[in-house]
Amino acid sequence: MPPNSPLNLRRTRGDALTAATVPARSDVVVVGAGLIGLSAAWRLAQGGRTVTVLERETVGAGASLAATGMLAPAAEHEPGSDPLLPLALESLARWPGFRDDLQAASGLDIDYREEGTLVLAIGRDEVERLRFRHDLQTRSGLEARWLSGPEVRAREPGLRPGISAGLHCAHDHQVDPSLVMAALVRACLGAGITIVEACPVEALDWSGGRVTGVRTARGAVRADVVLLASGAWSGQGGLLPESLALPVRPLRGQSLALRTTARTGTLSHMVWTEQVHMAPKGDGHLIVGATVEDCGYVPGVTAGGLYALLEGARRVLPGIEEMAVEALWSGFRPTSDDDAPIIDTLAPGLVVATGHHRNGYLLAPATADAVADLVGAGALPGYARAFGLARFGQAAERRASA
């Protein structure tokens, strides 16, 4: 967990964070107390439903507290991601309202920042790849301004003089994940939601072809709807029948937090390179992330991962050599086969919202609203209809007929 997380501080003081028992009945049971699960639970409770959230470990333990908090559809845009872009832009447009509601409900500021992203290039090869990225952004209707090396350094004087060029993605924003998660917990509890940690769901209850609840070691919970939002664990076998298997796997990411001072200086924008991204936070930390490792559910921070992060950051920001390393951590991105989320009804009474890869924070408002529509009206809103499970079967059929 990142340093000075409000959730961590509450645990240190011994404050009660979640409930110790599960209720016998709830309108909706959410499996997973990460960003997506809590966001959807909160929106569902705002619609008048009783909601119980069951978490296998602790709140935010999978990816939510390990993330950088980027809301960066322009910087993230890459070849093959055109189908995801409308959802990303829709969710970014919903973020200000989501932020205002969340801060009002929780009484916490989530450090929403709007300075934009600088995407950097060093050397001829990287400049050529950056021009390709800029052309792609322009063709997709995204705003990204080309900057010369001196123009980049005028915005960020602490960067190394060898910066050749950059892009300024002015509409990319960011939040502090630890503050967002603390605010969501407080908003959920204020809305009457029951959150139970260390309570893995062992099985789904079925009756007449529909899901009617869940079973845990602490007892069963009957429900009208079960929402599966357990991130990288959503695709694990045992809970779902083979016919409903989800193409979701974990990708480990390692990150670190550096303590900045007046002497070391810091950044005013999110900064991306081909190796790392760096995000300055309001509490004085500079978050450096993140590796991408397809190693299953192997946790922990490695020497190789730490070296890659530090060397990637030092390559463009020499001032990190004087910054104290305050925290190291890893998490598991929930990644689908096409790196896009899965939001769908799997069976009567069973809804899924998972597979957000590295865009969980960006896509949280749109996903939460889409789940609320799906549970309430029985259909996804137009902006989310392309992200059902059936697309994977359709892709397989196209490959087979090619």
Image: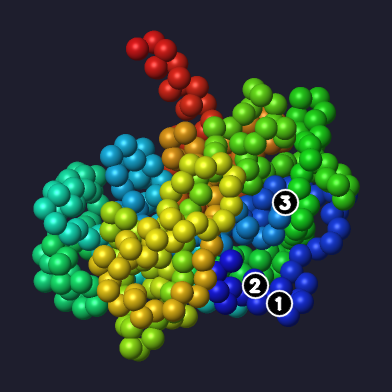
Q: Tag 2: residue type?
A: Asn
Q: Which mark is residue 56?
A: 3
Whichever of labels 3 and 2 marks the residue nearer the N terminus, that label is 2
Q: The C terminus appears in which quarter of the rendering?
A: top left
Q: Are marks 2 and 1 in contact (CB under 8 Å)?
A: yes
Q: Residues within 10 Å of mark 3 (few under 14, many from 20)?
A: many
Q: Which residue is mark 2?
A: 8
Residue reaching furthest bottom? 262
Examine the image and state in which quarter residue 268 appears: bottom left
Q: Which mark is residue 149?
A: none
| Numbered disc 1: secondary structure | helix
Q: Residues within 10 Å of mark 2 (few under 14, many from 20)?
A: some
Instruction: Answer with left or right where residue 163 lies relative to residue 172.
Output: left
Q: Tag 3: residue type?
A: Arg
Instruction: Pinpoint residue 240: horizontal percent, then vertical percent.
Output: 69, 31
Q: Between residue 366 and residue 398, name the one nearer to us.
A: 398
